Amino acid sequence: VLEGHTSFVLGCAFSPNGKRIVTACGDGKARVFSAETGECQLIIEGEHTLAVTCCCFSHDGKYILTSSRDQTARLWNATDGTLIKTLRHEDWVFSCAFSFDDKLIVTACDDKTVRIWDTQSGQLKHTLEGHTDQVVNSCFSADGNRVVSASFDKTARIWDAQSGIVLSEFKFNDYVRSCD
C-alpha cells in the first residue's frame, strides 16, 4: 500500500527502470515510492498550490514532470525533488509528458490548447489551437514528430510537433479522455 497522500490520487507512473513510482495528488503534492517496498522516498511539495493532475519520469530517469490545476507544469530533479523549471499556463494543466528523447515537453490544458515546450530552456515552442473544449491529455509519438491530443470536444487530433499543424482529426460520440 502506498501511503501518505491526504487526498485523491490523480495519476501515477513508473520510473524507466521500474524501481520507483511517482504519484500526483489532489493535496498539491507528488510523492515518489519504492515499487518494491511501497516506502515513500521523496515528497515533492511547496510549489504547486492546487491539485497535481499528472506526473511522469523522463525517459532517462533524471527528471519528474508534474502538472497542476494551479496553471503550471513543473520540472523537478528526480533524485532530491529540487524544482528546476516552472512552465506557466493560462488555465488548469491536465496532463504532461516528455518526448522520448526528453528534449520536449507537451502539456494539455483547460484553455483548449496543447503546448510544446523545450525541456532545457523552458521556452514555449508551440501553442496548438483548434480544440473547442478542454484538452485533457496529450503525448508524443515514439519518433517525437507528432503529438496526439484528447479533448472533451469529442475529438482526438494528431499534430505535427514541429509546425503545430493538425494532421488528422478523429471524431467520437463522447468525450475523449486519454491517449497514449
Image: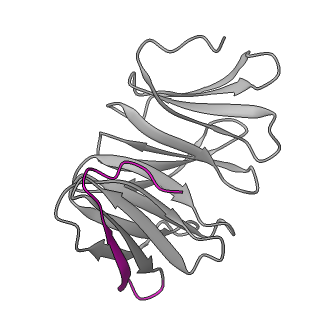
Residue 110 horizontal/vertical position (percent): 24, 52
99 over 24 or under it: above or below: below
- Would you say 177 lies left or right of 77 here? left
The image shows a total of numbered marks equal to 0
Colour logic: one colour
Name the residue at 51% across, 77% down: 146
Q: Quadrant of residue 7?
A: top left
- Would you say 103 lies left or right of 115 here? right
Residue 6 horizontal/vertical position (percent): 44, 11
Magenta span main SS: loop
- Which quadrant would the N terminus be assigned to in this image? top right
Q: Quadrant of residue 77?
A: top right
Q: Nearer the viewer, residue 51 or 35?
A: 35
Name the residue at 65% across, 65% down: 102
121 over 25 or under it: above or below: below
Q: Quadrant of residue 123?
A: bottom left
Residue 144 horizontal/vertical position (percent): 60, 75
Q: Which residues are magenta?
A: 162-180
Asked whether residue 25 is drawn in magenta, I would say: no
Residue 172 horizontal/vertical position (percent): 29, 60
Asked whether residue 172 is drawn in magenta, I would say: yes
- Would you say 145 lies left or right of 7 here? right
Residue that protrudes farthest toward the front in the picture: 173
98 over 43 or under it: above or below: below
Name the residue at 34% across, 65% down: 114
Q: Nearer the viewer, residue 112 or 63?
A: 112
- Which quadrant would the C terminus be assigned to in this image? bottom right
Q: Nearer the viewer, residue 32 or 177?
A: 177
